[in-house]
């Protein structure tokens, strides 16, 4: 009850932009990327990583969907995620460096 009172007192109603349509293709590509990457990382160790055809397909699908998603957000008029959002706090190169170095750090701590 106290949380509801706090929300109603301090959270303001946002204005809905009815002109902006939902970018279904961008959402689909991002969902396929995340889903394929999740399957790749979850099942990779048990399937002996790239010795399995399933893991190769999942990795290729994640890579292709990520490429298409990035190309789509930079070329679409109304993308699912604005490309300039990464310039706010962190850059795209910072995100990529975390994705590259995190597995190496994780292996050392295991």
Image (cartoon, rainbow, N blue to C red):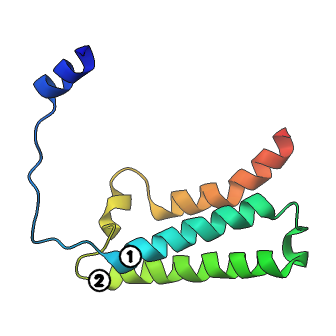
Instruction: Tell me where residue 42 appears, x and y as whole percent.
Output: 75, 58
Residue at the farthest top position: 2
Instruction: Tell me where residue 7 appears, x and y as whole percent.
Output: 19, 26
Task: Evaluate if marks 1 and 2 touch, with contact meaning CB atoms under 8 Å apart.
Answer: yes
Disc on res. 26: 1
Residue at image position (91%, 68%) is: 48
Q: Can residue 27 be seen in this view?
A: yes
The mark that comes first in sequence, 1 or 2, is 1
Query: How packed is label 1: few (under 14 Cα within 10 Å), some, or many (20 or more)?
Result: many
In the image, residue 74 sits, relative to residue 8, either above or below, namely: below
On the image, numbered disc 2 is attached to which residue? 76
In the image, residue 18 sits, relative to residue 10, either above or below, namely: below
In the image, residue 64 sits, relative to residue 35, either above or below, namely: below
Q: Label 2, secondary structure: give it.
A: loop
Quadrant (top left/top right/bottom left/bottom right) for the N terminus: top left
Would residue 33 be found to the left or right of residue 16 on screen?
A: right
Between residue 12 and residue 82, name the one nearer to us: 12
Between residue 24 and residue 79, name the one nearer to us: 24
Residue at image position (70%, 55%) is: 101
């Amino acid at each position: 009850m106290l949380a509801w009172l706090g929300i109603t007192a301090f959270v303001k109603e946002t204005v809905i932009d009815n002109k902006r349509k939902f970018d279904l293709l961008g959402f689909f590509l991002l969902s396929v990327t995340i889903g394929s990457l999740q399957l790749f990382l979850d099942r990779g160790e048990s399937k002996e990583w790239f010795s399995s055809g399933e893991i190769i397909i999942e990795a290729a699908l994640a890579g292709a969907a990520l490429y298409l998603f990035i190309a789509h957000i930079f070329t679409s008029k109304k993308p699912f995620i604005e490309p300039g959002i990464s310039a706010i706090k962190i850059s795209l190169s910072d995100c990529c460096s975390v994705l590259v170095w995190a597995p190496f750090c994780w292996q050392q701590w295991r």
